[in-house]
Image (cartoon, rainbow, N blue to C red):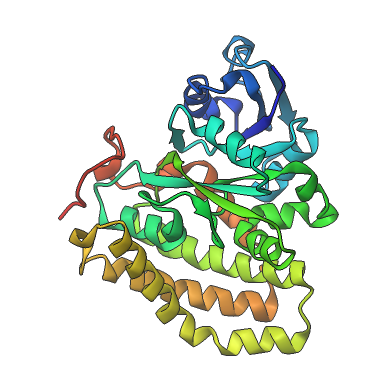
Amino acid sequence: MTIQLSVLTIGYETAGECRSVIRDLQRQSARDRIELLVVAPDQSGLEEHELSCFPAWRWVTVDGVRTCGDAMAAAVTAASAPFVTYAEEHSTFDPRWAERLIAAHAAGYDAVGFAMENANPATLTSWAHLYGQFGPVVAPVASGESPALAGHHASYRRSLLLEYGALLPTVLEDEAALVLDLRRRGRRLYIAGDAVSRHVNISRFGAYMRMDYLGQRSFASSRVRVGRWPRWKRLAYAAAVPLIPLVRLRRVLGHIRRSRRDHLMPRILVPISCAVAAGAWGEMLGYLVGGGDTALRKAPVELQRRRFIAAADLGPTDGSSGSPAR
């Protein structure tokens, strides 16, 4: 069977941190069409027999995982399939997830996003993080062409990514900026509502505030770099930042209603409002002075997620139901 999809995963300190998601990928109906790439500074914690069930796999050894974008770029460069996606260590997937991504690419789409469910639904902060960061793709969502895909939760035509050259780590660090650029270039984007990821969200309030600030600052900086914005445009967008919390909050509430989770209201307004305010401050700085070390500071939160979830979320959940803790 021809390899059609390269799936990369990242261990922040060791490859063993990827064991859970690799076991989940072993259950994919399209496993015989997957190339697995494990990016880590240390191969310990995983045995080759755990990878050999895939028709193709490889280690991508790095000196250290500084940022998600750097690690992802190393894997994309090493990949051999025509399409590539990222499987986070804190996500699990519907058994037909890869099959459905491959089918959407076969229909001609350059980028294919997938729907997301909450794998740790016990806290309001977890729901706030899910909707605040990934609102347009929170399940249930209808399949079809879409202007919005979730960062780190999409599959791309590899040749298209390689066109970014030296900017590849930047666009993979902040895929919201990548999606905006793909839309500008007239590329076809699709959301596969039946390809589902169950995602562990940040549920410690302080970590959520910090991550929204870092994420929005990094996004703004990447957007400027990818679009090669002149100074006047950066200043104009920075001046408009006070409107951003209202715009983001309106969109989040729309997606809560769309997905019929009105029971989260009105209490979810508190964590989301605080986060979008922190994010707006970060976005303004990103436009004015750049991202600084935000990508470095984001990496541990992205890649060692279970350190940033509340005790109420530590128990096993199936992500399909559940109410936030009171």
Measured along the vertical axis of the image, is residue 315 above or below residue 129?
above
Q: Percent from the top left, x then y, of residue 60?
A: 73, 30
Counting from the top left corner in percent of width and height, residue 215 is at 55, 63
Q: Is residue 179 above or below residue 319?
A: below
Instruction: Tell me which residue sits at (42%, 76%) in the image.
Output: 277
Q: Nearer the viewer, residue 156 or 203?
A: 156
- Quadrant (top left/top right/bottom left/bottom right) for the N terminus: top right
- Whether residue 39 is visible to the viewer of this picture, yes or no, is no
Q: What is the total number of numbered labels drawn onto the structure image?
A: 0
Residue at the top extreme, as displayed: 49
Residue drawn at (67%, 15%) of the image: 55
Q: Position of residue 123 (x, y in %)?
A: 25, 52
Judged left or right of residue 37, residue 31 is left
Residue at (72, 63) in percent of width and height? 186
Q: Which residue is at the front of the view, 217 or 33? A: 33
Q: Is residue 247 visible?
A: yes
Outermost residue toward the front? 107
Which residue is at the far left? Answer: 326
Above or below — where is 307 with respect to 263? above
The answer to whether 123 appears left or right of 279 in the picture is left
Q: Quadrant of the C terminus?
A: bottom left
Q: Position of residue 298 (x, y in %)?
A: 56, 55
Residue 282 vs residue 157: left or right? Answer: left
